[in-house]
Amino acid sequence: MKKTFPVGAVLTALFAASFFIVPLIATFYFSLKMTRGELGFAAYASVFNSAAFLNTIVYSTVASLIAILIGAVIIVPTAYWVRLKVPKLRPVVEFISLLPLIVPPVVLVFGYIRLFGSNSWLPLTSSTFGTDLLLVIGYVVLSMPYMFRAVDNGMAAIDIATLTEAAESLGASRLRTIVTVIFPNVRAAIISGAFLTFSISLGEFVLASLLNRPAFGPYLVQLGQDRAYEPAALAIMSFGFTWGCMVLMQLFATKKPGQRWLPRFAQRTTP
Amino acid sequence: MSFLSITNAVKTFGTNTVVKGFDLSVQKGEFVSFLGPSGCGKTTVLRMIAGFERPTSGRITIDGRNVTDLAPNKRRIGMVFQAYALFPNLNVFGNIAFGLKIAGLGKAETAARVKEMLALIGLSHLEERYPYELSGGQQQRVALARALAPKPQVLLLDEPLSALDAKIRVSLREEIRAIQRQLGITTVFVTHDQEEAMSISDRIVVMNGGRADQIGMPSEIYNHPKTRFVASFVGTLNVLKAQVDRRNAQTVTVGGKTVQLGQAVETADAQGNLSLALRPEALSLLPSESRNVTFDGTVRSVSFMGSVIRIRMDVGDEAISFDMFNSPNLAPPLIGQTASAHFASSDIFELSA
Amino acid sequence: MTLDVSASTADLGAPAPRTRAVRVTDWNWLGVTPFFLFAFLFLIGPVLYLVVGAFQNAEGAFTFANIIELGSPNIAASFSLSIRLSLLSALMGAVAGLLLGHAVILGGLPVWVRNAFTTFSGVASNFAGVPLAFAFIATLGRLGLVTVLLRDLFGIDLYASGFNLFSFVGLSIVYLYFQLPLMFLIIAPALDGLKTEWREAAEILGASRRQYWQMVGLPVLTPTILGCFLLLFANAFGTLATVYALMGSGFDVVPIVLFQQIRGNVLYNPNLGYALALGMVVIMGVSNTLYLILRNRAERWQK
């Protein structure tokens, strides 16, 4: 069989590549045009100098980090327990963890507002703290499918049943086992899930907007209505940020427990 | 008149020459096996016949027609793959009918032919089943029926039994041979299992390192191996060091005994050393008239293998192994005992190459 | 390794098991309680509240009025718009993703091309929402780079010929940026699963390339393609931030309508909001369930 040059495939790949790259180039170019007549980083400077930017991004970062923490604390022991003690519940837990994929954020936050509103049995929305809490919980719920899958895969990769038995035969209590044996070994999986959560939560719009919190997402939308060049700069930064998160997520997803973070630079000689 | 002929086929992948000049002439209705270890090039030659690999040089003709440059879908060849390769979206009927549908055969004729094929492989009751509902052996039989349905000129089988259990392997290979005989279709069968090749082939091509070391009938290959590789790959072999008599090239000294060979030695080196081969079944603990040579030695191990007992014996500084039937009248020797193994001088032969 | 709880209790002697069994099971269930509590409080609970509320009126009595009002011209138009947009977006994504997948995986291109697209797709499928809208405004907006280049270099005035980024068609092009990668990522393993032996077997039986694709390749891929189409549909249906950032609140897809309802920017009728939410959950639930069914079917074949 003669090998002919794959013209069709090359054209398709080129077309797709340009569809992906051209908007990025265009956005970057646009973001450099703030100063009339020349290309410069004025838009970026304007963004970083803006108090609103700093405040909202700090708010969103903190909210995301807390969401990651809560998510890990709820999901890791659950995944561990399901694997070890109640494997029959596994399909149920898995199904629940996937439910957020069919509940759009707008529906979720609507439910929160009605169920935890000012006239309800648990008026969380009446206080700022309560609303912040709701926002963070919303992020935990939205990231649940990804977090659960990451941790579950991580636990599947190490044989936690045997690890638990080994720890217990050496005298460790259940809690101690979780903290000192299980957690470190699934740490990489947790971090991997964390990066995905972070990337979802940081620019999240719907929950933040409807709960009226000063988060990064609503700030972005407002900026888009008010300004021309700064949104482009933010879009580029956002893309770079998402890229970074994905890369790190992949890195941690494939990292084995105990694997070195950096390659060995110097060889240690044994005495 | 050869039906399928391969002339000086060579196949190179980059810098690696996988097939180094292969010639073969297959008669119509013949069943030929390509036998050899992994990497010897047997599958590559088969794929060249099928048309999935283009020979770097050389020619392939089928029924007088040069097919070397012909696309696989025009060669009218049937092929059975190691991994069955049944189409998962079609049931058994659909799979077998595939080639007929492509050829444009009418509905009635297709149905008749498929039913015929199903009867041939004995799976008429599984017509509606899908591949994932079938066992490995059943899938392979359907694959065979699918390949044969369009009445191809040549049938190729690429290690079709390797993925199956041992028992099924044996029964299925008999079935394949029986069907092939019934249809009289020219067949090439690739395998690495020498027992498989010997039991069902008209001729065997033993391949090694991209070349055909020997082509011949199973008995010929077994009894008169041309190269050391063929001798050791097909069946077990005792290889013994020997010394040729300076004065008489037909006399050798081996295992401390002097043996008269049927013909002059050809492969002795300058010091007169050479290697001789002896099949285990040529040796026996029982003397007889025809077995005129005796090796004396010490028994090293006795392995009970059911109907056969395998004995390893040290003769001088060589080790030989031979089999004896598990007979109630003849007790096997004990380890450490001295014993005598007898064989006919005509059974020991020279190893060339 | 699974620990069979029932087995460990069955080993006990006859009289004791009942009490022992209950205690052991209780202790195990306790371990997953936090998760279930959390899920009920903050996921299942709120959704159920809305679902129940959809069938109630302001006084709390059972009624179908809200469901019926979903059929009112405005709401029905919203659903129609959402469904049409999601269908178009899913179709574009499915076709484009399949073509790209075929080109990159089966087209004979070097492996690094596939890896590059896979990595990029992982990022792009998450790059939805507000920044994506900004990026496309900078590209295809009235002053976007591509618009300007087409006008200055090729003399094609995009907006004069009727194109508008801030429209149904424009929106579906923006959606493609995250739909195409998603399709590519999901279809890639399915394309890998197309065994080369199938193609060779088809070829040796006389089939041309087209016949192979028609009779084997596409039929085998169809469950995955359909499943992915449904996934893309659900994905598009639930998108809000991208639409909002691009079109403002005026483009009446269902999520935006609900958004406005919650904001209180329209005549506030929470029960109607519940019905809208119910409609959304039903549509998303049905499409995702069908996706899972089709995915299982496909996996069964790829044995």
Image: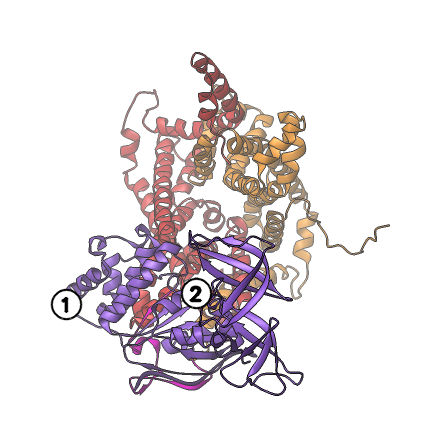
Magenta residue span: B54-81
**Mark 2, mark 1: which one is toward the viewer?**
2
Residue B40 visible in the shown view: no
In space, the residues marked 2 and 1 are separated at their CA atoms by 38 Å
Residue B193 is labelled as: 2
Q: Secondary structure at mark 1?
A: helix
Residue B109 visible in the shown view: yes
Along the horizontal axis of the image, is B104 left or right of B217? left
**Residue type of the residue flagged with mark 2:** Asp
Chain given the colour red: C
Q: Which residue is painted at 56% across and 52% down in the image?
A: B334
Residue B109 is labelled as: 1
Along the horizontal axis of the image, is B77 left or right of B238? left
Check the residue under mark 1 and report the chain it is in. Answer: B
Chain given the colour orange: A
Chain given the colour purple: B
User: Which of A216/C231 is in front?
Assistant: C231
User: Which of A265/B306 is in front?
Assistant: B306
In the rendered image, residue C266, in percent from the top left (x then y), is placed at 40, 35
- Do discs 2 and 1 belong to a common subunit? yes
In the rendered image, residue C151, in percent from the top left (x then y), is placed at 48, 71
Q: Which residue is painted at 59% across and 35% down in the image?
A: A162
Above or below, A56 relative to B210: above
